[in-house]
Image (tube, helix red, strand yellow):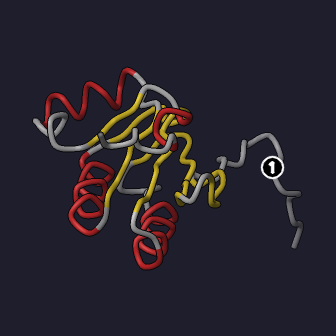
Amino acid sequence: MVREPFDNSVPVPSPVVAAEGEINGYWVVRAQGELDSETVDPLFIAMWQAVAGHEVVVLDASAVTFADSSFLSLLIEVHQRTELRIAAPGTALTRLLRIAGVDGVLRTYPTLDAAIAPPPPTP
């Protein structure tokens, strides 16, 4: 039997969770790529682990290139359990939030720095 070598020309997809860690006291999860029912599981796990141990979870969505209803469902579930901040959503994600009617419910920030900034002092 002749075995063919592995086809190295097929690109390996990048992980959807690029990084996780604490910044300014907030837990930040950096997501990237296409997030749909086929790829969202690693992000699902990372977000639920974050919810279990942190009052504020920041999702850096600056590298998300596509998102579907499974990703949107995850965002809504996380929002119901903790304070979720979505940093730097791109055009596609902003449009999805608007079309789904949750853009007024989910908190978005133009940049990661804005999402992790301390709240302004109360007078």
On the image, the x and y values in percent for residue 90 come to 43, 25
Task: Read off the residue under disc 1.
Answer: 7
The answer to whether residue 109 is left or right of residue 105 is: right
Instruction: Name the quadrant containing residue 79.
Output: bottom left
* Residue 51 placement: quadrant: bottom left
Q: Residues within 10 Å of mark 1 (few under 14, many from 20)?
A: few
Nearest to the observer: residue 48 or residue 99: 48
Q: Locate residue 68, reporting x and y percent.
A: 30, 43
Amino acid found under the numbered disc labelled 1:
Asp
SS class of the residue under badge 1?
loop
**Residue 86 position (above or below residue 110):** below
Position of residue 14 measured from the top left corner of the image (x, y, whole percent): 66, 47
Q: Which quadrant does the C terminus fall into? A: top left
With 41 as the anchor, is 3 left or right in this view? right
Q: Residue furthest left?
A: 101
Residue farthest along the front direction in this orientation: 123
Q: Position of residue 2 (x, y in %)?
A: 89, 67
Left or right: 37 as drawn, with respect to 50: left
- Residue at (65, 47) in percent of width and height: 13
Give the residue drawn at x 30%, y 59%. 74
Residue under the point 41% across and 35% down: 66
- Residue at 62 percent of width and 53 percent of height: 23
